[in-house]
């Protein structure tokens, strides 16, 4: 039976007939379904090739490439390693709000707006997928087909939302009955028909999305990683000593677990790598360009080193730093085989997704620069750069620690700049001596407690860490084991905490005899400085 609702919105048309307007929530639903169907179709198309990406990922990559530095710093400070998740959801929410508004006006008759929105969305995504870093000409396809799908759903929604009189078949001799109409005199909106059709679109969208995810999963680098053996160094390091973190609650462990290791990069989604085609190339200002397969690198003499790396965005006291046991090839040996031109002054790492980071040739000064294949006894995790990455002790990651490495290019600073340098960061970025308080927390009970943390100055090592409580004297702490000058050191000090509010700060001295400065400097353009300071409320 046709449903009729005399309370539904109506508008006066030419003559005396009053036509119903669909409720706003009908339009909102159609707008969201159009968005979902479009994104699902884009995901399916992206699943046909490693070089294709979904519209959201394409747009997100361009946002990352063009976001102003202050906004980037704010995002890292506010969201830390979840900044990319926040970015994706922010894009989705903004587009969803627009889609709701567009859906409302489309089902109420402005189909031109619906089509225009779909075309604009498709073109924006096509631009993002076909222009800029890590793009290909075919990268326009997912977004163009996503826009076309969204337009089709909007037009279908408009048709479903129009009043429709029931059709009856009656004998020729019978007197036709009048069509069902509302009290306004116009055919009623068919809610049941609309909801059933919308439900069908929703089910189809979910199914399409599942197909897209399945197709894209075929290119997941984790599948490739699962098939490789852990790299084995020819001369393994001795097992780490007993970790003081086992007996000091809240102290950072000597070796950072893989799952806890920070991740800061420009990749909205992990690059897809096939080991069948992946190669590490050494190009540019060299005597002989070289190329190595993954098996070539794994069969070389592998070294194992304990090295702390940190992000330049790490604020004083921040957690964008970690210490790991890296396994890989000596970068010095690889470059020696290629032969570096005497006028080359920059080593540029290039990732699979075309990110670039350059550091001075002069850093090949005997430090343990590694093309890392493994981390903490495992094959390099995907999030940390599988199949290979650069680890250069003493340099911030944005100029050196290229993940998903595909090329090492010898060049010059006056000819080429790494990704972050044109965006306002320094071309050279040695890691500054830093220390951090891990415990106690902001509120503790009185009594004897441990003040503890870590300090790092890769290539120089840490020789001393001091703590000052309130405005008292600086007290030398106990240092934990030293794995190497490239690795952080734990430190701790027993404190008889008395009731009240207290201030605690720390400072480290490195192997060069330099004590970290008190001067507070922001992370931009080449790393933060200052003494980490916490405030503790001790209960009675």
Image (tube, rainbow, N blue to C red):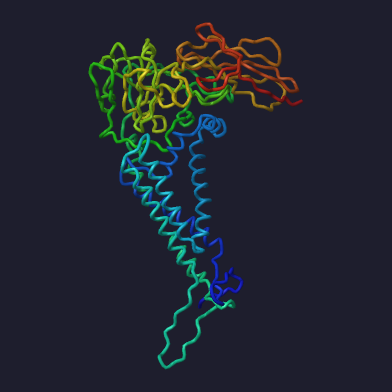
Dividing the picture into quarters, in which one does residue 369 lie?
top left
For image coordinates 53% across by 73% down, the residue present is 14
Dividing the picture into quarters, in which one does residue 173 lie?
bottom left
Taking 301 as reference, is 146 left or right?
A: right
Residue that lies at the very extreme toward the left in this rendered image? 288
Nearer-the-camera pick, 452 or 175: 175
Image quarter (top left, top right, bottom left or bottom right) of the C terminus:
top right
Q: Is residue 179 above or below residue 157?
A: below
Q: Is residue 465 above or below residue 61?
A: above
Q: Residue 42 placed where, x, y %?
A: 38, 49
Q: Residue 453 placed where, x, y %?
A: 57, 20
Q: Residue 189 placed where, x, y %?
A: 52, 71
For image coordinates 47% across by 64% down, the residue present is 158
Q: Is residue 246 visible?
A: no
Dividing the picture into quarters, in which one does residue 10 lie?
bottom right
Q: How many discs appear?
A: 0
For image coordinates 51% across by 76% down, the residue present is 2
Q: Is residue 58 above or below residue 376?
A: below
Q: Is residue 417 above or below residue 18?
A: above
Q: Residue 59 placed where, x, y %?
A: 43, 41
Q: Is residue 355 visible?
A: yes
Residue that lies at the very extreme toward the front in this rendered image? 14
Nearer-the-camera pick, 331 or 134: 134
Residue that lies at the very extreme toward the bottom in this rendered image? 173
């Amino acid at each position: 039976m046709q449903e009729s609702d005399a309370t539904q919105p109506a508008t006066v048309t030419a003559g005396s007939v009053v036509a119903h307007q669909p409720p706003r929530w009908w339009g909102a639903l159609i707008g969201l379904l159009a968005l979902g169907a479009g994104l699902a179709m884009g995901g399916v198309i992206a699943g046909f090739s490693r070089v294709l990406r979904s519209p959201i990922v394409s747009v997100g990559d361009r946002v990352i490439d063009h976001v102003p530095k202050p906004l980037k710093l704010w995002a890292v400070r506010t969201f830390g390693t979840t900044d990319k998740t926040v970015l994706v959801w922010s894009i989705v929410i903004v587009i969803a709000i627009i889609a709701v508004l567009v859906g409302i006006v489309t089902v109420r008759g402005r189909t031109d707006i619906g089509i225009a929105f779909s075309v604009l969305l498709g073109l924006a995504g096509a631009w993002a997928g076909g222009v800029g870093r890590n793009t290909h000409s075919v990268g326009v396809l997912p977004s163009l087909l996503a826009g076309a799908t969204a337009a089709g759903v909007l037009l279908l929604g408009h048709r479903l939302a129009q009043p429709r009189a029931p059709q009856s078949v009656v004998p020729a001799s019978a007197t036709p009955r009048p069509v069902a109409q509302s009290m306004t005199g116009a055919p009623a909106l068919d809610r049941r028909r609309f909801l059933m059709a919308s439900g069908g679109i929703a089910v189809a969208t979910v199914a399409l999305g599942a197909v897209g995810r399945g197709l894209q999963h075929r290119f997941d680098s984790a599948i490739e990683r699962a098939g490789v053996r852990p790299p084995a160094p020819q001369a393994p390091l001795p097992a780490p000593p007993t970790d003081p973190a086992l007996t000091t609650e809240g102290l950072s462990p000597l070796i950072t677990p893989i799952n806890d290791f920070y991740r800061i990069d420009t990749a909205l989604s992990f690059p897809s790598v096939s080991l069948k085609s992946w190669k590490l190339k050494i190009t540019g200002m060299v005597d002989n360009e070289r190329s190595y397969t993954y098996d070539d690198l794994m069969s070389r003499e592998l070294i194992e080193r304990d090295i702390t790396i940190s992000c330049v965005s790490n604020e004083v006291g921040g957690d964008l730093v970690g210490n790991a046991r890296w396994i890989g090839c000596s970068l010095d040996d690889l470059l020696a085989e290629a032969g570096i031109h005497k006028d080359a002054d920059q080593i540029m790492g290039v990732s699979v997704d075309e990110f670039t980071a350059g550091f001075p040739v002069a850093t090949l000064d005997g430090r343990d620069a590694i093309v890392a294949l493994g981390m903490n006894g495992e094959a390099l995790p995907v999030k940390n750069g599988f199949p290979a990455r650069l680890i250069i002790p003493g340099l911030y990651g944005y100029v050196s620690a290229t993940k998903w490495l595909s090329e090492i290019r010898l060049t010059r600073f006056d000819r080429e700049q790494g990704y972050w340098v044109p965006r306002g960061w320094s071309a050279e970025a040695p890691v500054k001596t830093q220390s951090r308080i891990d415990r106690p927390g902001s509120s503790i009970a009185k009594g004897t407690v441990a003040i503890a943390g870590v300090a790092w100055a890769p290539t120089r090592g840490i020789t001393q860490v001091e703590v000052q409580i309130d405005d008292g004297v600086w007290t030398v702490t106990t240092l934990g084991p030293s794995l190497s000058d490239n690795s952080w050191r734990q430190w701790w000090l027993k404190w008889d905490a008395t009731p009240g509010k207290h201030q605690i700060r720390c400072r480290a001295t490195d192997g060069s005899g330099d004590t970290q400065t008190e001067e507070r400097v922001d992370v931009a353009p080449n790393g933060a400085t200052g003494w980490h300071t916490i405030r503790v409320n001790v209960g009675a």
